[in-house]
Image (cartoon, helix red, strand yellow):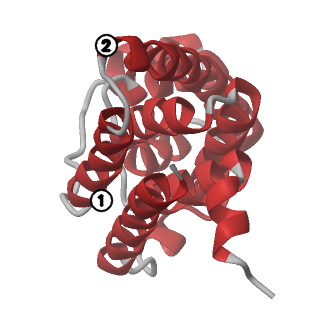
Amino acid sequence: MFDITTFSASPFLASTVAVAIAEVGDKTQLLSLLLVARFRNKWAIIGGILVATLLNHGLSSWGGIWIGENMESWLSGRVVDYVLAGSFALMALWVLIPDKEDDDDDNFAKYGAFIATTLLFFIAEVGDKTQIATVILAAEFQSFFWVTAGTTLGMLIANAPVVIWGQWLMDRLPLDLARRLTAVVFLGLAAYTLLSS
């Protein structure tokens, strides 16, 4: 039986679910489609997504842990919990806004599927919703490994099927529903943050 406290208390599970759902319809899925159209080597694209996400979300987790550890010296008592809960609530609102497609991939095609994907995904994730979510999740859970592993798995869950099945899958994904579900996940994390402290 599903227990919400297990979901909320597990940095790996919370990170995986939050990012996997948040990625549906994200610009990186559109980037995945563009890369599949340009390169034939799907495994190189998936490998590039893996490496870029590990690097980007690893740095984000490290930053989130640092913020979480030091926030208490900047703010006192329950204020930290309110800041984290507010951050999750803001993420819930932000994920309801659809992403716009960027066309920066032409300059990277000459490097091949793996390097182009690694560079483009790393750049696409800078300042993206899932990168900010990774920082917030790491600040809350104080777990570099499990948050990075969870957000990376979430990225792969959302993007690998797009690489493999491409446009057929994108035409059938209910993007509005995915955005609403993601908002619910982040609101749940906000509530957990307030109730668990």
**Residue 3 in the image, given as x and y percentages of width and height:** 72, 78
Rendered position, 77 above or below 99: above
User: What's the residue at 47%, 61% (across, down)?
Assistant: 195
The secondary element bearing badge 2 is classed as: helix
Rendered position, 30 above or below 96: above
Rendered position, 125 above or below 88: above
Is 134 displayed left or right of 105 in the figure?
right
Is 70 displayed left or right of 102 in the figure?
right
Quadrant the N terminus occupies: bottom right
The quarter of the displayed image where residue 84 is located: top left
**Residue 40 in the image, given as x and y percentages of width and height:** 65, 41
The amino acid marked with disc number 1 is Ala
User: What's the residue at 35%, 14% (across, down)?
Assistant: 107
The amino acid marked with disc number 2 is Trp
Q: Which mark is residue 74?
A: 2
Q: Which mark is residue 141?
A: none
Nearer to us: label 1 or label 2? 2
Is 166 displayed left or right of 91 in the figure?
right
The secondary element bearing badge 1 is classed as: helix
Marks 1 and 2 close (CB-CB < 8 Å): no
Mark closest to the chain's N terminus, 1 or 2: 2
**Residue 7 in the image, given as x and y percentages of width and height:** 67, 65
> Which residue reaches farthest right?
1
Q: Is residue 24 visible?
A: no
Q: How many marks?
A: 2
Q: Sort mark 1 into few (<14), some (14-19) or many (20+) by Cα contacts within 10 Å.
A: many
User: What's the residue at 44%, 77% (across, down)?
Assistant: 173
> Which residue reaches farthest front?
77
Q: Is residue 30 visible?
A: yes
**Residue 11 in the image, given as x and y percentages of width and height:** 67, 46
Check disc 1 and report the residue beneath it.
Answer: 92
User: What's the residue at 21%, 59% (across, down)?
Assistant: 93
